[in-house]
């Protein structure tokens, strides 16, 4: 078995920094999973999961809705409890060997980000199918994956894999509205120890890309600029980072 290189997950992407507006149900179940593992089959709250033949949750949604954030948050809580788990981002699958999934069924949680990345690759689809079958047989691990594609999407060319993915539970992760995005920026700035005025926050939101990934990337750059200039974040600093000049 070839283990992947250890992945350092973003420390500021946790449940506290996730704005759950419109996604309250999925956040609640993930928090229950994080609290219930490794003995999730004995948890009253997770009873419906333990009754599934394949304990699989798929977080389904478009890009930059916070699906990866939720995986990171779950893994952070399990790491704090020293519960066995592994996070894999399948966007990187081409740099791995095909046996990377071997033995994962013995963990408490398998977190697979962006499983749509392997759609159309028969060898990798078969490897994922085999892993899910071993999860069914061992009855130990719980699987959480994220995807842009539903389980029945024909982009997954292996019918048996589509069938297995459909055995799980699907949660749609919804985009935040404008108020939710502002709250997400406020929380992330707070997590980073940044003092971001409401005026600067609103200017940032109205003059940058609106998706969460872009907003968080911009906030990270502003954090670096703030440290370099030894100044608190301001509208002027946001303008300079966005190359807007003195408008």
Image: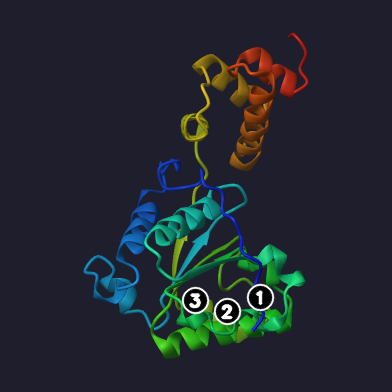
In the rendered view, tell whether residue 57 sits above or below residue 210. Answer: below
Q: Work out whether residue 111 can be spotted.
A: no
- Disc 3 and disc 2: Cα gap in Å? 6 Å
Task: Name the element at disc 3.
Answer: loop
Residue under numbered circle 2 = 162
Residue at 64% x, 79% y is 100
Residue under numbered circle 3 = 166
| Image quarter hosting the N terminus | bottom right
For mark 2, does the 10 Å Cα neighbourhood hold few (<14), some (14 to 19), or many (20 or more) residues? some
Residue at 29% x, 68% y is 46
For mark 1, does the 10 Å Cα neighbourhood hold few (<14), some (14 to 19), or many (20 or more) residues? many
Question: Which quadrant holds residue 246?
Answer: top right
How far across and down, in percent of the image, does residue 214 sit?
66, 38
Query: Where residue 156 is drawn, which disc sits there?
Result: 1
The numbered mark, 3 or 1, whose residue comes first in the sequence reads 1
Q: Nearer the viewer, residue 67 or 223?
A: 223
The numbered mark, 2 or 1, whose residue comes first in the sequence reads 1
Mark 3–mark 1 CB contact (< 8 Å):
no
In the rendered view, tell whether residue 96 sits above or below residue 78. Answer: below
| Image quarter hosting the C terminus | top right
Task: Name the element at disc 1.
Answer: loop
How far across and down, in percent of the image, does residue 188 sit?
51, 35
In the rendered view, tell whether residue 97 sits above or below residue 199. Answer: below
Say left or right for 136 vs 127. Answer: left
Mark 3–mark 2 CB contact (< 8 Å):
yes
- Disc 3 and disc 1: Cα gap in Å? 12 Å
């Amino acid at each position: 078995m070839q283990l992947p290189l250890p992945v350092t997950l973003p420390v500021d992407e946790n449940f506290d920094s996730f704005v759950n507006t419109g996604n309250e149900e999925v956040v609640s179940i993930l928090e229950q999973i994080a609290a219930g593992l490794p003995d999730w089959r004995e948890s009253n709250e997770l009873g419906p999961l333990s009754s599934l033949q394949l304990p699989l949750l798929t977080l389904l949604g478009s890009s930059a809705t916070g699906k990866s954030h939720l995986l990171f948050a779950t893994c952070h809580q399990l790491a704090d409890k020293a519960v066995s788990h592994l996070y894999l981002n399948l966007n990187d699958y081409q740099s791995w060997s095909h046996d990377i999934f071997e033995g994962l069924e013995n963990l408490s949680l398998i977190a697979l980000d962006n499983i749509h990345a392997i759609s159309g690759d028969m060898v990798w689809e078969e490897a994922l199918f085999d892993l899910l079958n071993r999860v069914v047989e061992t009855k130990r691990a719980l699987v959480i994956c994220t995807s842009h594609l539903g389980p029945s999407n024909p982009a997954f060319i292996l019918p048996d894999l589509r069938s297995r993915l459909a055995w799980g539970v699907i949660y749609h992760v919804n985009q935040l509205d404008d108020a939710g995005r502002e709250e997400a920026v406020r929380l992330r700035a707070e997590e980073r120890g940044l003092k971001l005025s409401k005026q600067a926050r609103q200017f940032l939101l109205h003059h940058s890309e609106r998706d969460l990934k872009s907003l968080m990337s911009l906030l990270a750059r502003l954090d670096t600029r703030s440290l370099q200039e030894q100044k608190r974040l301001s509208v002027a600093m946001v303008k300079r980072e966005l190359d807007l000049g003195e408008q």
